[in-house]
Image (cartoon, rainbow, N blue to C red):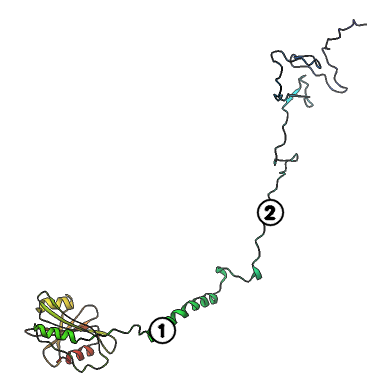
Amino acid sequence: MEPAQPADRVPADRTPPDGQPPVTPTGPTGAVAGSGAATPGTGPTPAGTPAEPETALVESPAGPATGEPALVEPTGAQPAGGDSAQGEPTDVPPARPARPATPGGKEKSRAERSPKDMALSLLVLLVPIALLIAFYRGFLGGEQPTTVDPTPAYEQARSANAFPVSEPAGLGSGWRTVSASYRTVEGGANLRIGYLTPEGRGAQLVQSNVPPEQLLPVELTDQGQPQGPADLPGGNWQRYTGRGNEQALVLLEPNRTVIVVGDARENELRQLAGALR
């Protein structure tokens, strides 16, 4: 028979449950289980201070026995919206609402429009423009040249008496005067009358007392060159080239120079030059 043990003595070896190996403590226990004494070196826990989680003692899995329990950190609360125990997400984003269907499904995008639709759209825009142009030309006289009365310019040139002044006569109603001026320039004075021919082309009648060597380069540019005589009544007329597609008829006199120039046809230029009186 073993001698009696003191009542406060803790057995050295704790008897494990049936079928499990004995558990050996890894360090000194601060207090006897159930005594409620605090661990040496630490004071009593103040009121209101949350207690730190203690490491749980879990037995080692099957394998070589080490005699020491495995330390497992306590798991906290599962975060909201996290994975479930099976590893699958618990929160699923809501499905996007479907776009409302086009009423009737008949509306077409721009890429699906046929050439016929585009032509109809363009026609809708062109019809009002055509009506405005027709109204401008038919009722407002659009694109009709503005005619002027050349009489004041002729009278001013005759009053200055700088050179003899000639005026065309009998041109016909198809000829329209669109400009007329008399101006004093360096070296003399110029009388300039602009016409619109019956064919709708331009022609100018220039009379001046400026020296020819100074006047011709200005009126015909440096490319103006004589091309031979022109058979016209009233003097010795010469044919000249002009700027661009223009041509000219030039009459050289001692006190003046007469130039008929423009992009009109030669027969119209000859008609204007032969009508001078």
Identify the mark at residue 135; answer none if there is no mark: 1
Could you tell me residue 111's position as x and y percent? Answer: 55, 68
Query: Residue 65 in the image: x percent, y percent?
Result: 78, 21
143 relative to 34, above or below: below
Give the CA separation, mark 1 to mark 2: 61 Å
| Residue that extends furthest to the left in the rendered view of this protein | 254
Closer-to-camera residue (148/164):
148
Nearest the viewer among 240 and 155 is 155
First in residue order: circle 1 vs circle 2: 2
**Which mark is nearer the camera, 1 or 2?**
1
Name the image quarter holding residue 96: bottom right
Q: Quadrant of the C terminus?
A: bottom left
The amino acid pointed to by label 1 is Phe
Q: Which residue is mark 2?
A: 95
Residue 248 tag number: none
Q: Residue at x 70, y 40 (%)?
A: 80
Query: Going 50% across and 78% down the picture, which residue do you hit?
Result: 124
In the rendered image, the quadrant that contains the N terminus is top right
Q: Is residue 245 left or right of residue 19?
A: left
Location of residue 52 in the rendering, given as x and y in whole percent from the top left corner? 70, 24
Image coordinates for residue 139, horizontal then vertical, percent? 38, 86
Q: Is residue 4 visible?
A: yes
| As drawn, 255 above or below 66 | below
Classify mark 1: residues with Cα within 10 Å, few (<14), some (14-19) or many (20+).
few
Q: Amino acid at mark 2?
A: Ala
